[in-house]
């Protein structure tokens, strides 16, 4: 999981925004719309990043399709130290 | 010469372009994250870029070598070199797909 986090968050073009999304939903689970607003990103961009993060089991979805909220997956939480290390490097 | 030469040259050129884009992404991420993951990818990208640029230089630019490659290299050798470059192009296309995603 650590390698997945390093790759998905620091090896790809959208890495920085994925880190911002992860940091935001760790504070409080949100849906794609709320994320787009609070991060000032395009809704489609947010959806795309969430799909990639779900694909890699970094985040999970809770609730029904429409308005479902996203939160860090258990595997991601188990490796939250890695995420924190990555977050620190952006600031 | 045969079509193999052109395909080899074209895919080497394509590799240079794709590697340039990928290396730029990894370099930018290295500047942001300072992670060994990003620098590792960047080192890989830069050296593979150098390899393909050197191949292009030998095939097309260098006055002695390009003439030799164009006239004296047998078709079987070109076929195999073409395969090497095309395999690389396919691999890089896949890597680009997941990196730009």
Image (cartoon, coloured by chain):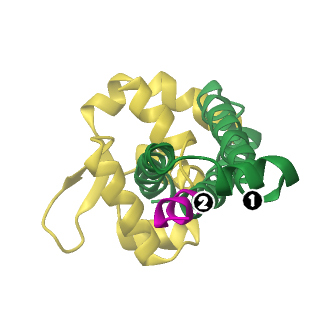
Q: Quadrant of the C terminus of chain A?
A: top right
Q: Nearer the viewer, residue B45 or A81?
A: B45
Residue drawn at the location 48% of the way across and 71% of the way down: A36
Q: Quadrant of the N terminus of chain A?
A: top left
Q: Can the viewer see residue B99 in this picture?
A: yes
Please state the horizontal and vertical placement of residue A16, each as a whole percent of the image: 59, 51
Drawn side of residue A22 relative to residue B62, left or right: left
Please state the horizontal and vertical placement of residue B60, each as a whole percent of the image: 75, 59
Q: Which chain is green?
A: B
Residue drawn at the location 55% of the way across and 49% of the way down: A15
Secondary structure, mark 2, is helix
- Circle 2 residue: B9
Q: Residues within 10 Å of mark 2 (few under 14, many from 20)?
A: many
Magenta residues, as a range?
B1-9
Please state the horizontal and vertical placement of residue A60, each as a whole percent of the image: 24, 48
Which sits earlier in the primary sequence, circle 2 or circle 1?
A: 2
The tally of labels here is 2
Residue drawn at the location 26% of the way across and 49% of the way down: A55
Q: Which mark is drawn over residue B60?
A: 1
The reply to whether the magenta stretch includes residue B101 is no
Real-space CA distance between mark 2 and mark 1, rounded to the nearest whole angstrom: 8 Å
Query: Are circles 2 and 1 on residues that touch, CB within 8 Å?
Result: yes
Q: Is residue B54 above or below residue A34?
A: above
């Amino acid at each position: 999981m650590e390698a997945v986090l390093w790759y998905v968050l620091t090896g790809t073009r959208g890495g920085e925004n994925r880190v911002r999304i992860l940091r935001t939903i760790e504070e409080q689970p949100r849906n794609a719309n709320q994320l787009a607003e609070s991060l000032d990103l395009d809704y489609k961009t947010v959806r795309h990043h969430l799909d990639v993060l779900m694909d890699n089991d970094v985040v999970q979805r809770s609730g029904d399709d429409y308005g479902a909220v996203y939160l860090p997956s258990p595997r991601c939480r188990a490796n939250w130290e890695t995420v924190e290390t990555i977050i620190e490097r952006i600031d | 010469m045969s079509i193999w030469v052109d395909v080899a040259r074209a895919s080497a050129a394509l590799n240079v372009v794709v590697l340039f884009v990928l290396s730029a992404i990894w370099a930018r991420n290295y500047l942001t994250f300072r992670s060994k993951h990003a620098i590792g990818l960047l080192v890989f990208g830069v050296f593979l870029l150098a390899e393909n640029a050197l191949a292009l230089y030998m095939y097309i630019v260098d006055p002695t070598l390009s003439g030799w490659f164009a006239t004296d290299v047998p078709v079987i050798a070109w076929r195999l070199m073409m395969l090497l470059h095309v395999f690389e192009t396919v691999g890089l296309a896949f890597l680009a797909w997941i990196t730009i995603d």
